[in-house]
Amino acid sequence: MTRLVIRGARLLGAEAADLLVEDGVITQIGSLSVPRDADVLDADGLVALPGLVDLHVHLREPGREDAETIATGSAAAAAGGFTAVFAMANTSPVTDTAEAAERVHDLGRACGLTEVVPVGAVTKGLEGAELAELGLMARSRAKVRVFSDDGHCVHDARIMRRALEYVKPFGGVVSQHAQDPRLAGREACCHEGEVSGRLGLPGWPGIAEESIVARDVMLARHTGSRVHVAHVSSAGTVEVIRWAKAQGIDVTAEVTPHHLVLTTDLLAGYDPVYKVNPPLRPAEDVEALREALVDGTIDAVATDHAPHARHDKEHAFVDAAFGMLGLETALSVVSDVLVQPGRLDWSDVARVMSTAPARIGRLSDQGQGLALGSPAHVTLVDPDREVTVDAAASRSRSRNNPWHGRTLRGAVMATVFAGRVTHDVRDGAGTRRELTNATTSGANL
Ligand SMILES: [Zn+2]
């Protein structure tokens, strides 16, 4: 039997306690005497959260291993405190069959740093025309429950309706990338307004998101099925979701760390690191998103971690790829902008970054709130540590990091996945492991 004692952590930010982990399961909580054969992880002064769960990442494998692999993405996830990540289907080939989903699932298991849960495509090849093998993916070894054409909107209402009907019997959910292609086409890359006009960039208006979400919540009501809104970016979308929840419609939503902080005026220098889909919005939208996360209208924080190789990202703004890194900085961003000012406490962070996303994605052994008998997925956070983000130090294979050079308060110090330490940068105690990590990621680069 393997034994680990996590000593003196403040559980969800409340009083300090020890956790005994035996064979990956939390078996005792309280003031414990350390068994002789146990490893000890000293967490004095740290906050313990249930392992973080990310509903929305792009790991690029198979097909674009020059940007990220399941191994490098898993290492970035562990460093960010994540014990489960949902890998989007827009790989090459697309995850639109049971075999493709099982391959991602198996590669994630082989890495063993975090649970890698494949998201299945809604339509074959993400082409929006014909439903993918939703049932076969759900019944596969990968047990797919979240389906998304992310990167593309399921814009055909009939296909969206069929997908919602199809996933209902097995408790699946359709995660929609809401972007009406007639209102915001492929070239749209800047919030439509004063900034897009001044910079001469194709506009991406909030209404292109809001109108799809309005339609989808009505389809969810009509079918009695579940819809999830990916990366909400506009205040208008928040209003629609708030209304839909008040009607009892089964809708959930996520917001990215970048949409909680970064604003459209950052595009003034045409730096492609700020090019993301949906685009950065004005400060009014950012504030509406923060409010919605605080009041529960938005259920979860999801990173939309989107690594890109230099040769895809370092172009003129209009030609560069969409997307930014997020796994390693998400907790620090949420801590800095919402916990430090007192708008969320640590139990709220546990809700929006672990419990809610695990529930939405139907992961039964994640997001359980550090309860007795639950799998030991634990994230240890130093709430007072200031970190200055260094893009070059990332575990990700890519460097498109919009947080580079920023100082954020609150940092992940260690991650425990199924009772095993997958990341550890605590002072002194973590030095040896840090070196091991550095060697591993160096070998991958
Ligand atoms: Zn998307």
Image: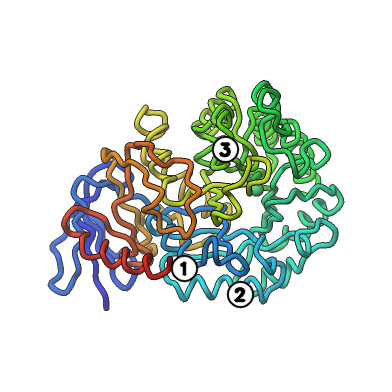
Tell me if I can see residue 438 in this picture. yes
Mark 2 touches mark 1? (CB < 8 Å): no
Q: In the depicted view, which residue is nearer to us: 354 or 180?
A: 180
When asked about the image quadrant of residue 185, the answer is top right
Give, as a three-letter code, the residue at label 3.
Ile
Q: In the depicted view, which residue is nearer to us: 255 or 151?
A: 151
Q: Earlier in the sequence, mark 2 or mark 3?
A: 2
Dot 2 alpha-carbon crowd within 10 angstroms: few under 14, some 14 to 19, many 20 or more: many
The residue at the point 62 percent across, 58 percent down is: 88
Q: Which residue is mark 3?
A: 298
When asked about the image quadrant of residue 221, the answer is top right
Q: Which residue is mark 1?
A: 71
Q: Which residue is mark 2?
A: 102
The residue at the point 68 percent across, 74 percent down is: 98
Along the horizontal axis of the image, is 207 left or right of 77?
right
Dot 3 alpha-carbon crowd within 10 angstroms: few under 14, some 14 to 19, many 20 or more: many
Closer to the camera: disc 2 or disc 3?
2
- The residue tagged with tag 1: helix, strand or loop? helix
Closer to the camera: disc 3 or disc 1?
1
Residue 382 to residue 210: above or below: below
Q: Earlier in the sequence, mark 3 or mark 1?
A: 1
Quadrant showing the C terminus:
bottom left
Query: What is the C-alpha distance between the residues marked 2 and 1?
Result: 16 Å
Query: What is the C-alpha distance between the residues marked 3 and 1?
Result: 30 Å
The residue at the point 51 percent across, 44 percent down is: 301
